Amino acid sequence: MKFSKRIQQVNPSMTLAIDAKAKELKANGEDVIGFGAGEPDFDTPERIKQAGIRAIESNETHYTPVGGSNDLKDAIITKLKRDNGLEYDRSQILASCGAKHSFYNLAQVLWEEGDEVIIPAPYWVSFPEMVVLAGAKPVIIATDASNDFKITVDQLKKAITPNTRAVLINSPSNPTGFAYNKSELEKIAECALENNLLMISDEIYEWIIFDGFQHTSLASLSQEAQKNCVVINGVSKSYAMTGWRIGYIAADAEIVKQVGKLQGQSTSNPCSISQAASIEALTGPHDDVLEMVREFEKRRNIMVDQLNAIDGVTCNKPNGSFYSFPDFSALYGKKDPSGKVIQGSLDFTEFLLTEKKVAIVPGVAFGADANARMSFATSLDKIEEGVKRIKEAVKLLR
Ligand SMILES: *Cc1c(COP(=O)(O)O)cnc(C)c1O
C-alpha cells in the first residue's frame, strides 16, 4: 500500500504509546502505578452530565450549525467576557471536536509549505506534528527549568525569519505546568505584533492554576493583541470532559470563516449533546471546578516535595495544569542492575516501568530529554506509592 508523504512525516503520539504499554502491563495483572494520564481522573460534574441527559431527552440530537449552536457560542462569549475580559461576537467563535481539532483546523487553514511556526519546547506533542501535517515548518525554541520553561522575548526575536507566520503560546503548559504572567505575555505580544506574527494562545488549562496565580489571556492585552490572536480553549481539562470532545477558537471573523469552510467539508458540527453539556459547564456554578483544582494543588505539593527529596532529582513547583516536569538528567550515564547505561529520558522511563512498574512519560516526547512528565491526575495514595518506588529505583542505579 502506498501512503501519502504527508502522513509518512507524522510521528505517532508517544504519550499514547506509553499509556498503552502501562495498560497492557496492568491487564496482565501487574501492579502498575501510572503517571501518564493526560486527563483529569475526576468524573464530569453531575450538573454537566444532567445537561447532556436533558439534551438527549429533548431531542437535541440533530445537526447544529457547523461551528456550534448559537446558544453554545453565546455561552463561550459569556465565558470569555467573565474570565478574560474579552468581547467577541458570534462571527468570531467556532466550536470543534476538542481543542486538538481546533488547532488542527487552524494549521490547515493558516499555513503551508514555506511557512514557519514558532513553538516553545517543551511542547505538547501534537503541536509540531499538526504543523508538519499542514506542510509548514515548526521552529522550536528550547527552554529549561532556569526560566520555568518559558521563552524570553530575546529568544523569540532570534527565532523570527521572513517566513515566520505565527508563535504559539500554551499557558499554563502541558507538559511543564508553568504559566506566563501578564508582564511576560506583554513582552511576547509586543514582539509578535511588531513582526506581524499571529499569536496562537492555547489556554485549555486556564482554570487549573495554583497559589492564587492569575491567568491572563494573551488576547486580552490590547485591542491589537486580540485582533492578532487566536484563543484556543475547550471544556476537556477544566471541567473533566475529555470524552465529550468540545473545543473552540475565538478569533478574527475572517479566520473563523475559513475554518468554518474546512470544518463544513470535514467533520461538520461537534456533537450536539456535548454542546448542550458544555453550555452548562461554561455558564453554571464553578464550585466543582474549584474543588477539583484544590485537590490538584494538594497533590502537586506532595508530588513535587517528595520528588525533590530524591537524590539526583530536581523539580520546580508548577503553577498550573496537572503535570510536574522533574529533571532526571543527573542520573543519566549511570547503569541499571542489568548493566545497561541510562542514556536519556526514554531509557530512564523504560527502566522505571520494567524495574518498579511506574509509568511516566519521557521528556524527549516533548522536546526536553532531561525531564519526564508526571501527571498528578491520580490519587494521593498512588502519588505517594509511585514516588516511593522511583526513590527505590534510583538507588539501584550505579
Ligand atoms: C489536552 C490538551 C488539548 C486538547 O484537548 P481536547 O480534548 O482536544 O480539547 C489541547 N492543548 C493542550 C496543551 C492539551 O494538553
Image (tube, rainbow, N blue to C red):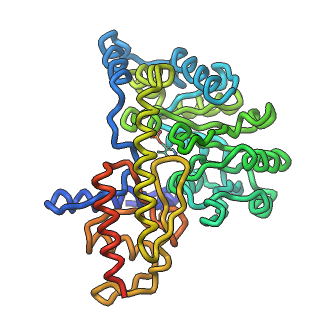
Q: Residue 17 placed where, x, y %? A: 35, 60
| Nearer to me, 21 or 96 | 21
Q: State whether residue 117 is above or below residue 361.
A: above
| Residue occupying the point 41% across, 86% down | 334
Q: Is residue 285 left or right of residue 194?
A: left
**Residue positioned 64% across, 56% down in the render:** 119
Position of the C terminus, as image quadrant, is bottom left
Residue lying at the far left in this picture: please name it.
Answer: 29
* Most foreground residue, 180 or 96: 180
Residue 204 image point, x, y percent = 53, 40
Relative to 201, residue 30 above or below: below
The N terminus lies in which quarter of the figure?
Answer: bottom left
Q: Residue furthest right?
A: 194
Quick check: 368 left or right of 305?
right
Q: Is residue 116 found left or right of 134 in the rendered image?
A: right
Which quadrant holds residue 271? top left
Q: At x 77% / y 45%, what residue is drawn?
A: 186
- What's the residue at 54%, 19% (across, down)? 75
Q: How many marks?
A: 0
Q: Position of residue 158 (x, y in %)?
A: 79, 64
**Vertical placement of residue 293 versus 78, above or below:** below
Q: Position of residue 193 (x, y in %)?
A: 82, 44
Q: Is residue 142 visible?
A: no
Residue 73 in sight in this render: yes
Question: Looking at the rendering, which quadrant does residue 384 occupy?
Answer: bottom left
**Quadrant of res 79:** top right
Closest to the observer: 322 or 6? Answer: 322
